[in-house]
Image (spheres, coloured by chain):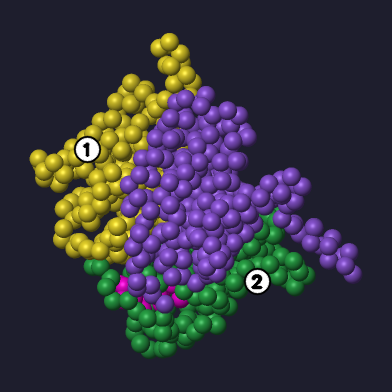
Chain colours: A purple, B green, C yellow
């Protein structure tokens, strides 16, 4: 199937300020990671832009519907750059960055899981594709950030639920919107709550995705 | 030249089950590499998807004909995920993984060299572009896999013929299909045989692509 | 806004030979870097192609206007491959590679900053987008090169002006072309002079983009 109908921007149902909030949150988390890696001002701004807009760019390169967020949303890039520069120059704005990075990161993962899925829904893709695009948008920025810093991306490392939280959030958004039982904004809030809740629960009770040994032990016990 | 005519899916001449076979083979090789890197279940599935579908995604991001494999082929992603999960949970299915990884890898490289070139042919690109796209599809998944694992991709390392095998396979496919002397499926089989044969010969006789010193010695000897 | 009008190639105002000059310069710098990393012939040619054409490919994947440079410009890829192979086999052609790499690199950054911005201008994107695309094209190839070599890309490291030089060059090109006071070729020359000049000044006087400590010291001194 070749996508022929191009949806207009007006059909994207997530309010503008919520997208901007996610861009700001992800950019702050990017500039704080950059300071941990001792990057200079230019590198820190670049890393913040990667975190803030990289996931959406990967999504749009994949969807190929000719509506690329960083090209068509004139506020996104300047906002990401300005946020990064301000936080870099006045670090005192941010209290306890080591606690703030994961919080801002998972908030933006939650919002991006919804906005990424929403864009695919608007253009009429299949539900499974919409879930995948939500996941891609949510984790893409962090994946690029880790790649550029020479670190194996978190989703390939043993961690608490992060990828799983993003998939669950994206799935809940797609199900709620397609079932028509609530508005897009309400579904987005559920998506963020599901994403952050699963992440928090996995950290609180130290639940991690299973390794080979866990599965071997589990299968052995059943016998 | 801007590509204006969009080919329909029906024109892609490689049978469906052969593509699915390559997706399964590449996904198994991905999950086996993931187990070598001690990834957990989520990371292993993600790496299998990167191996199975990453090369095709890079090809489609480049071709920009609006027909993206992972969006439009509803079986590919679930099949890759299911294959990876089953092999991860029941590793006993696979005997001698250290021998199986390179075998599955080169089989999928051979099939992807043909399917990648075929898609570019279907959309009317120049022969050189089709060969390049076959190569890109064949080695793209492995390149992304190595990048995410923090390893310098194989094609940039001193190895036996791997890139050269992929280029030779892709070239043979394009020449055979354009000459019209055999069907696409027959040409694909030739492509796989050429790719696997060159790889096997280079391993058997330890032929590697030349380094600076080899070339200097060769040029010196001629004088 | 969805981009609907597709510009024809004839509208791209940068002369063909200048683009080819940049491809050759970037490919030579790529093959010289490859020799420093002791890559073999195949790896060196691949790295040269990444340097020579990677930035333009990233730009075209982002712009999604259906006019992909490596697909539609039949000379670019063969020229990059041939340049790389010749320099690899006959290294004596190049004198003092350790001095030549940065020089060729910054020349191609300057030209790509103009050609990248120019393509976005031709397709009617906003000025800020055109500047960003010039920057992306200019530094994209080197970023991919560093990523594949397992090195943290230069723009994320403390360096003399490199990213800043590329942004300044791209900005000067967009301003000069939009103001209409000079031809595209004259604006391209200004762009290259600005890019190389800023880079040279920053190296000559050892000016680097500020770190956290520099900014803290500066803000403290003001009080």
Residue A25 shows in the view: yes
Residue B159: image quadrant is: bottom right
Q: Is residue C155 left or right of residue A132?
A: left
Q: Secondary structure at mark 1?
A: helix
Residue C67: image quadrant is: bottom left
Q: What stretch of residues is rendered in magenta?
A: B114-127
Type of secondary structure dominating the magenta stretch: helix
Query: In percent of the image, x 52 and y 31: which residue is there?
Result: A35
- Give the spatial CA distance, label 1 vs label 2: 53 Å
- Depth check: A136 or B194 in front? A136
Q: Which residue is mark 1?
A: C172
Residue B102 shows in the view: no
- Depth check: B154 or C171 in front? C171
In the rendered picture of this protein, how many numbered marks are placed on residues? Answer: 2
Q: Chain of mark 2?
A: B
Q: Is residue A48 left or right of residue C205?
A: right
**Residue B100 x/y as whole percent:** 67, 69
**Residue A148 x/y as whole percent:** 50, 44
Identify the mark at residue B83; answer none if there is no mark.
2
Q: Secondary structure at mark 2?
A: helix
Q: Is residue B37 above or below residue A39?
A: below
- Depth check: A27 or A195 in front? A195
**Residue C99 x/y as whole percent:** 35, 34
């Amino acid at each position: 199937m070749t996508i022929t109908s191009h949806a207009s921007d007006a059909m994207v149902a997530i309010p503008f300020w919520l997208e901007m909030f996610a861009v700001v949150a992800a950019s702050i988390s990017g500039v704080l990671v950059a300071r941990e890696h001792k990057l200079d001002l230019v590198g820190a701004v670049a890393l913040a832009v990667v975190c803030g807009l990289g996931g959406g760019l990967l999504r749009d390169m994949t969807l190929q519907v000719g509506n690329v967020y960083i090209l068509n949303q004139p506020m996104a890039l300047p906002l990401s750059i300005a946020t990064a520069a301000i936080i870099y120059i006045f670090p005192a704005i941010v209290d306890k960055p080591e606690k703030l990075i994961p919080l801002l990161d998972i908030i933006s993962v939650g919002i991006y899981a919804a906005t990424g899925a929403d864009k695919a829904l608007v253009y009429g893709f299949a539900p499974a594709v919409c879930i995948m695009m939500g996941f891609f948008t949510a984790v893409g920025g962090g994946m690029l950030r880790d790649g550029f810093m020479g670190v194996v991306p978190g989703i390939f490392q043993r961690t608490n639920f992060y990828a799983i939280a993003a998939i669950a959030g994206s799935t809940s958004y797609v199900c709620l919107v397609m079932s028509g039982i609530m508005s897009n904004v309400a579904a987005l809030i559920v998506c963020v709550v599901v994403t952050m809740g699963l992440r928090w629960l996995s950290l609180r009770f130290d639940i991690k995705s299973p390794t080979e040994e866990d599965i071997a032990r589990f299968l052995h016990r059943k016998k």
